[in-house]
Amino acid sequence: MEKQDGRYWLKEVVTISVMVAMECTNVGLNTIFKAATNRGMSYNVFICYSYALAAFVLLPSPLFYRKTGLPQLTRPILAKLFLLGSIGCAAVMLSYKGIDYSSPTLASAMSNLIPAFTFILAIIFRMEKIAWRRLSSQAKVLGTVVSIMGALIVVLYKGPAVMALLSSSNSSVRFHNFLTATQSQWIIGGVLLASEYSLTPIWYIVQAQIIKEYPAELVVVFFYNLFVAVISALVGSIAEPDSSAWRLKPDISMAAIVYAGLLGSFLGSSVHAWVMRRKGPVYIAMFKPVSIIIAAAMGVILLGDTLHLGSIVGATVITMGFYAMIWGKTKEEMHEELKAKDVESAAQTAPLLQNAETKEVDGS
């Protein structure tokens, strides 16, 4: 029993460590993308090349299923994979354009809206039940409202500068950021990021459904990256007709594409698919608040960004709402588990009572 508990906690620690590492990777991706776009790289080119690289790396993925065998890839599954790629491509484009207008810190703060939007979507599709008299349901609803209020604070209130990196080497970068990141651009970036994070829960639900029907995560991730690369190439050919924009040079643009393709699109998508099958999408969303601290630190240190009061206040409010919602969800799951155990114990006790009654009748 102790060995089983030890293995369980070891798996939990490994899963948590992997998810924290992925959040660090995602924040690093947003930061290096922002640095590359400041040098003139197009986000359409970035998306196309990074996802094409990830699809190329995942080409041998069917070899991992030689022993178990691959499930049959039917037309309905391919259609759902294309839908997943379309939703993902739209979300990624909105995300990177939003970061281009604002900052990685704002993107990380706004990412805490994912569980709130997921909860609202679950209610609409009757996947989530609300019992207004229960404290857990009240916490979920209140947490959702508070999270959305926090996002509005981040978007609409930039506030005074709280902390900037006092380094002469980054003074020109900070001055450039001050000139370009106007209030209107900040709001546009926030709206784009909010739109992206409203699509992400839909993407989670579609991916979870596909993995249930086609339990080969690496193949699902391969087709997802392939479809995103194809769709972004078609969009990019219209948005970026200049062929010079598609030529890569050995500078930060190429480094950003390799980083995004290998650590983001390939490794990140694979890990999220694996964790989603084991824990579900809500577990993945639980780690989003970690990204705020990482993004703020990396933005100030690497990009010379100024940390604004609105981002701190809004991120704090979003995090409070998020954890209120998670607390309510956890309480409901514990309540459901207790009910299931009571039903199971009652089902096991009933035959024993019947046997005892039968023996008493036979004995008399």
Image (spheres, grey):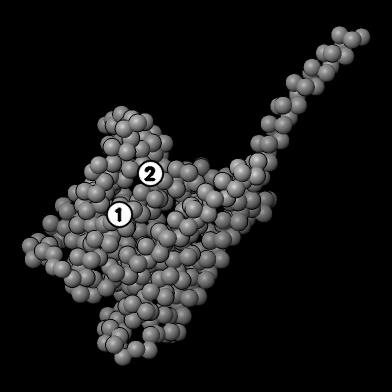
Amino acid marked by disc 1: Ser
Q: Is residue 231 above or below residue 342?
A: below
The residue to which callout 2 is attached is 207
The residue to which callout 1 is attached is 265
Residue sitting farthest toward the front: 3
Amino acid marked by disc 2: Gln
Residue beneath the point at 48% across and 52% down: 15
Residue 15 seen:
yes
Q: Image check: 224 left or right of 118?
A: left
Q: Point out residue 355 in the picture as x, y percentages from the top left corner.
A: 79, 17
Q: Image check: 145 left or right of 175?
A: right
Looking at the rendering, in which quadrant would you find the C terminus?
top right
Residue sitting farthest toward the bottom: 168
Residue beneath the point at 52% across and 66% down: 319
Could you say which is closer to the camera, residue 159 or residue 352?
A: 352
Q: CA distance from mark 1 to mark 2?
A: 15 Å
| Tag in front: 1 or 2 | 1
Mark drawn on residue 118: none
Residue beneath the point at 38% across and 74% down: 298
Residue sitting farthest toward the left: 243
Q: Image check: 158 left or right of 46?
A: right
Q: Disc 1 vs disc 2: Cβ atoms closer than 8 Å?
A: no
Q: Point out residue 29 in the picture as x, y percentages from the top left corner.
A: 32, 65
Could you say which is closer to the camera, residue 252 or residue 321?
A: 252
Q: Point out residue 268 in the picture as x, y percentages from the top left corner.
A: 36, 54
Looking at the rendering, in which quadrant would you find the N terminus?
top right
SS at mark 1 in the image: helix
Residue beneath the point at 67% across and 51% down: 134
Q: Image check: 360 left or right of 252?
A: right
Snapshot quadrant of residue 185: bottom left
Q: Point out residue 350 in the picture as x, y percentages from the top left corner.
A: 75, 24
Snapshot quadrant of residue 35: bottom left
